[in-house]
Amino acid sequence: MASARLISSLVIKNWKDIFLGLNSLVDVGGGTGTLAEAIADAFPHLNSAVLDLPHVVGGDMFAATPPTDAVLLKVMACACECNSEQFTFY
């Protein structure tokens, strides 16, 4: 959790201009929402939602994504319950 908070603070500090023109953001694969919460705290006008696997949060990242100004996707090396057939990499 501490590393997620550190990364969140670095993202907001170094790339805050990215979030300034947005009104909404969906964090897909957002886990428990640490990054989305930090962004929402830093930009109170920004409506945010978190989607992940259904057992992690209420929203399902494989179902429909709500209308939004931006989708936040983080790339990380991890073992997950998904297989490679579910994703297309470019």
Image: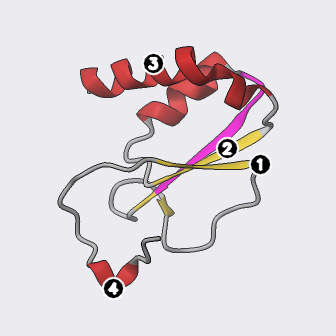
Q: Residue at x 49, y 65 (%)?
A: 61
Cα distance in 3D space between marks 2 and 3: 18 Å
Residue 8 lies left or right of residue 80; in this view the side is right
Range of magenta residues: 44-51
- Closer to us: 84 or 47: 84
Q: Residue at x 38, y 63 (%)?
A: 53
Identify the disc placed on residue 43.
none
Residue 60 lies left or right of residue 79; in this view the side is right
- Closer to us: 8 or 64: 8
Q: Which sits earlier in the primary sequence, circle 4 or circle 3?
A: 3
- Name the colouring of the figure: secondary structure
Q: Which sits earlier in the primary sequence, circle 2 or circle 3?
A: 3
Query: Mark 2 — residue?
Result: 25
Q: Amino acid at mark 1?
A: Asp
| Farthest-out residue, left | 79
Cα distance in 3D space between marks 4 and 1: 28 Å
> Callout 3: helix, strand or loop?
helix
Q: Which sits earlier in the primary sequence, circle 1 or circle 2?
A: 2
> Callout 2: helix, strand or loop?
strand
Does residue 42 show up magenta in the picture?
Answer: no
Q: Amino acid at mark 4?
A: Glu
Cα distance in 3D space between marks 2 and 4: 27 Å
Tell which tag, 1 or 3, sits nearer the viewer: 3
Q: Label 2: how many residues lie within 10 Å, few (<14), some (14-19) or many (20+)?
A: many
Q: Position of residue 11 (x, y in %)?
A: 50, 24
> Callout 1: helix, strand or loop?
loop
Q: Position of residue 68 (x, y in %)?
A: 75, 53
